Amino acid sequence: MSPDLVRDILIATVPLMVIFPTLFAFTTWLERKALARIQNRIGPNKVGVPLTRYGGRFSLFGLGQPLADGIKMLFKENIVPRDADRLFHLLAPILALIPAMLVLCFLPIEFPWTESLLPVQAFLLDGAVIFFFAITGLNTLAIFMAGWASRNKYSLLGGMRAIAQMVSYEIPLVLSAVVVVMMVGSLNAAEIANAQAGWNWFVFTPWGLAAFVIFFIASLAETNRSPFDLPEAESEIIAGYFTEYSGFKFALFFLGEYIAMFAISGLAVTLFLGGGAGPGIATLPWLSAMWFIAKIFALIAVMIWLRGTLPRLRVDQLMGFAWKFLLPLSILNILVAGFAHFIPQENIVSKVAVWVVSLGILYMAAKGLNQLNRPNVRPRDYKYAE
Amino acid sequence: MSLLGGGILKGMAVTLRNFVGSYFDRDRLTTNDYAWRAGDSLPQHAGEYPKEEGEQLRDTTTVSQYSRNFPMLLHDEGEAMDTIRCVACQICERECPPQCIYIEKSTEKMERGGNKAQFYPAKFDIDVSVCMSCQICVEVCPFDAIVMNSQFELSTSNRFGGLLLRRDDLLKSNGYYHKIHPEEAAARDRRMAEEKAAKEAKKKAAAEAARKKAEEKAKAEAEADDKKQEDTQ
């Protein structure tokens, strides 16, 4: 490796390692604030500029909270259960963080400083989308490792739930992304983003809209976000796989989870929301990165909103939803995409017709699946009571 | 035919309404009572935690009148130990689910407020690190001597001794009780007055009945005497 290449690699990757953890800190604050407001509370508003008394006069809406949390996490005691597998207990949080960080490189964010570094623009990798799914799949392993190594029933239950959930939702996730790959004819993230330049975002097509919704739901499950947060369900299994984690190891898990959220939202932005496309990027190219991150935050905001709204699913509902609803629907969506692709769309009438027919088919299918999956509920007969 | 996923959208509309509403409508905020106001007025609207040093009070009267956390002992107007209501019957000690109350009965009885002389607690400790704020002690107390306090600033630097409240820490006047829980205290006082009145009425009735009975007996005896005298004559 030549020194130049090393330099380029560092310039391309180190900012990612700085920007996204910073955004993570901000997001935790944002999430706590938003959830508080949804519940008619105020949320963190005391910690302000560090080292000022009480943070009172400069509390800045509690923006110092992530910093205080970070310091607290760093200084907390690291407790490892006596019978835990110490090596894997240590490795699991690291393994949870690495794939999440790694896939950030595949997001086609056009930072101003990467322009001159074409050889290391990692997102030029031709199989970026495949690589993305392959690497994020490692996350499952990390979570099960944590559950197994803790030697705790709740942790193990959480790990097992995580495996079942993440393996199941990977399929609709990939199948909904396949539509975009089909249409663009490339697995290259940058090419997919470029194909949507201007306002030709795939979310503005009937099949793209459906795929985006499926992708978003599956990505919630992949990142263990509410309402699919069964692996870490506090009220059922304490904290699932990180019951036995404290201090900095817990912080690593937390960081990994949020980075994974950024990464998968970034992929959704790349596939459906036009990547860095947006007004003003022709004159100011650096706006592209801003747009990209703004779109990621829009998706994160919806995730937080959903977390404040929906109750957790039951395990059987979770599995049924993946296999009996999302999977058939995403397969049907591939056919619909083919239909929409081969019907000529010259004038507005044919465009509207394609929209109506495509969404009609998908909606009827969803409705039908919903009917089919309806649980067979009948009045309960009491054997002993009364 | 209902819209698929319509329930989720409806729920999201509700949370959005709460989210936006909490910024414009201060009355929505449920946790805003944690504030200190000058004077004796209880805060009715949003405030924030005291920002200046010295604004915190040990006897916090700033929370909602429906708030409660740990028990306190009541005494009537006057010197605390002279008017303490507790008679060290130890019912609360026995009923307390987490067993956080420790009572030591006094050796001699004490008279208070013209009532019959009773025992008093020589020791009355509540370990608030154990207490679960269930209020069962309040419900079982036949003397209305223990009620819930709403004081919340209990942080100490010593987690054993500091969180063990002694009898003298727990003693509060009925006036303080009226200040922190006006509705509850008024209801309790009313009930106590009614009970007292009923008791007195009963006593009076009993006395009356006894007097009547005695009169009748005297009369009957007198009649019997008369008869006897007649017989002998």
Image: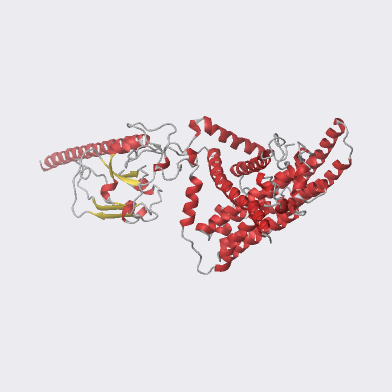
Residue A80 rendering spot, x and y as whole percentages? 51, 65
Q: Classify A90 as above or below B161.
A: below
Residue A175 locus on image (x, y percent): 77, 51
Q: Residue furthest left?
A: B233
Task: Left or right? Give the position of A50 relative to B204.
Answer: right
Report the quarter where the N terminus of chain B lies. top right
Q: Position of residue B101 (x, y in %)?
A: 33, 54
Whether residue A307 is visible here, answered yes or no, is: yes
Q: B202 or A203: which is nearer to us?
A: A203
**Which one is in front, A301 or B6?**
A301
Residue B27, image x and y in percent?
48, 31
Where the C terminus of chain B falls, by quadrant? top left
Q: Is residue A224 visible?
A: no
Residue under the point 63% across and 44% down: A300
Residue at the image position 82 percent from the left and 41 percent from the top: A361
Left or right of A68: which side holds B192? left
Check the image and tell me how it is coloured. secondary structure
Give the image quarter of residue A52. Answer: top left
A325, A34: nearer the viewer: A34
Number of numbered labels in the structure image: 0
Residue in the foreground of this view, choosing between B213 and A198:
A198
Outermost residue, front side: A3
Judged left or right of residue B224, residue B38 is right
